[in-house]
Amino acid sequence: MKLWRRLTPWPRTPFVTAPQPWTLRRVVRAGLAGVGVATLGMLALGVAGAVTTGAFGRAWNLRAELQPIEVQDRRGEPLGVIDHCQENAAANAVPCRESLSVPLTGVSPAFLLAYVAKEDVRFFSHAGVDLGRLPRAVLSGAGGSTITMQLLKNSVLAGHFDYDTGRRGLGLVLTRKATEFVLAPLVTWRYGRREVLAMSVNSLPWLGIGQRKGIYDAAHAVFGVDPADLTLAQSAFLVGLLPAPGRYLVTEETPPEEATARFRWMRTQQLLTLKILRSHGLIREDEYTRAAAEPLQPRLWQVEYAGSGPNLRVVSARRNPDYRNEPEPVWALQELVRRELRTAGLDPRRVGRVVLTLDRSAQAALVRRVTGQGATGGRPAGVAEGAAIVEVQGGGIIALASSTGGDQSSQPGRQWAASARRPVASTVKPLLYAAAFGKGLTQLSTFRDEPTRYAGQAIRNNSGTFLNRPVTVREANARSLNTVAVQVGTEHEPALRRVLASVGYAEDTANHASPALGTYRSSPLGVASAYASFANGGELCQPHLLAEAYDRAGRPLPLPRRECQPLWSRAVAYETFDMLTGAVNDAAGHVHFLRAPLVQRLLGTAVPLGAKSGTTDDVRDTWCAGITPQYAMAVWIGDPQGVQSVPADLYRDQAACREIGLLRELPHTRRSLDVPEGITRVGGVAVPTPGADVQNPTPPAPQR
């Protein structure tokens, strides 16, 4: 001390005194000061977290953030809903999930009691933050989040800090908790407790992030009932899943011991929830006993119990081999709908309801076929299938389905029917012949089927043989002769390339074979759209899903749409349609199994159907496209990565073309095409009348 005084020339201040002994009063004052400093620090950290993530605005508009878009088909039938959780990928990385919102009156009172008692028993008495719960949470390690704070974590703050980001750290956890602490009172004041509870039960993540959320999906997926019909035992089971919803999921490969242990954990959580309800006096002893003695059988599980009453116990549990859980029809299409809304200049978060061009029954039928539940059977591993049906007039998409990922995933890159860009093979031939019809060729023009070359490359037919005789264009198309296609394509290659660009096909610059053999690439949706022009008087329409859109108040929203554009003359379109029916009905037709039943043919009630198949040389892609007066359809089966070949039985049995048979099952209000001016029939074949001007218009600009 003397040394210090020598080093400091200024006199000792009279305000500094010797340390005073600690008293109870000083300890209390210091503790309160520490709490104040910690609270101010937490508030400052929370405000900073809310500002940097933009959470203030999103919390203020939380109802709009959580309220999904209601989706209907063309007849007003419900197709499901579309969430908004991926609209701002930079601010919210949670994958989108289907979630139908239901009011509190549509939820079982037993579930609401169990949820509030287990998660936040003082929910209706605090302002979003339970200060009395925080010390116990710190001392016991239990969760201190209220229902309001959990709602914020699962929605506004998801994809930030430590939740749904894959990042961990005490600083991230504290920042998220502080942000919840700041926002929870704001949300409670803005919406009220009942609305907060309704938003919470409709946005709870149940079976793992990105799969299911909300009480509606949970009740239907787990027990197959409406939320209003949940029993006390079922409600306690669902609430018990919340700490670790991923444990509910089980596969056929899960070892029996692990599956049984997992279900026993769920049973323990169910009983814990029931005991909490009983301890708070929310249920009677006899209600507890009945619920605890109920042998639940969730749809995903097959459980064997022993004992009865309060002594009921789990003996074994495994995945139910008969479990099926198809998602809502719009589940696979939600990203495509969002994309169309944004293209139309609409913010999906401001849209309350959309009406799609889809037909619910046609969509369900196509999904059954494409996912292997129809007559053609399943697909081998690594082989995907995509199919699209569009309406000829207007281009509305009637159905769209994919076998791999597309029926359960909203990722646009996995919806093969819309995004796969594969070589279209021989489905290009009708486009080639239509281009040539506009320059004087007809169905009855003849070419020899004989060895042919293109750019020094020998051209062979799929049969490996040649007829070595003259054949008409109609027969060449019916037999899918490559030699004739290359002969016609060599003369009309510039016109064909312009047509392929206009319908949105992409050139494969690495493939130097004739484009008449289908080297250009497209998706099933693109091929169906191109074929639709043959039954639409030569008009090419851009395919679309949206028919109508409405805001949250029910007001209609504008949907600007590109007008249909002329691709063929009316005479050429009709002649090409007639040529396609020859591939089905003529003796030389390669898809004769698509002919109408004999009774319909005799009565004259059969709807005209034309089709064309196609397979690439490496057999990694097999196609079929079909057309009726009202619908156009395209099916693709292959390896999306272009690595492995399609199994021989699939392309030899023309599996893709057998799917086209669905067109005959669809209801048709347009059952025939009007014969345009300049067309006559010679031997039953549609050809231009002598001297008729059937020249095609200039192809429209390429579709984007």
Image (tube, rainbow, N blue to C red):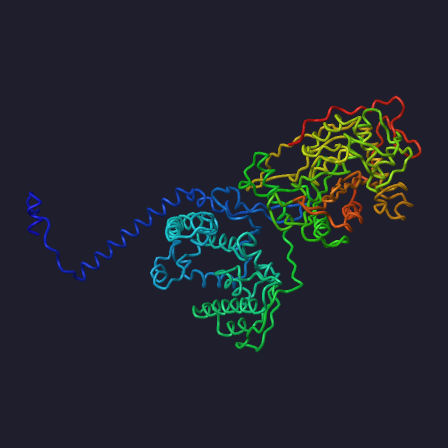
> Where in the figure is residue 286, as x and y percent of width and height?
51, 74
Instruction: Farthest residue to the front: give it.
Output: 456
Asked if 298 appears above or below 496 in the picture, the reply is below
Q: Nearer the viewer, residue 249 or 277?
A: 249
Q: Nearer the viewer, residue 250 or 567?
A: 250
> Where in the figure is residue 211, as x and y percent of width and height?
57, 53
Q: What count of labels does the image hold?
A: 0
**Residue 281 placement, left or right of 660:** left
> Where in the figure is residue 93, as x and y percent of width and height?
50, 46
**Who's the residue at 64% across and 39% down the image?**
546
**Residue 270 placement, left or right of 562:** left
Instruction: Work out which quarter of the rendered image holds the C terminus and state it.
Output: top right
**Residue 694 placement, left or right of 521:** right
Instruction: Judge whether residue 506 can be spotted in this image.
Output: no
**Who's the residue at 13% across and 60% down the image?**
21
Asked if 263 appears above or below 583 in the picture, the reply is below
In the rendered image, which quarter is residue 11 located in? top left
> Where in the figure is residue 541, as x and y percent of width and height?
71, 33
**Who's the residue at 75% across and 26% down the image?**
495
Q: Nearer the viewer, residue 510 or 238?
A: 510
In the rendered image, which quarter is residue 226 located in? bottom right
Asked if 480 appears above or below 286 in the picture, the reply is above
Instruction: Judge whether residue 448 can be spotted in this image.
Output: yes
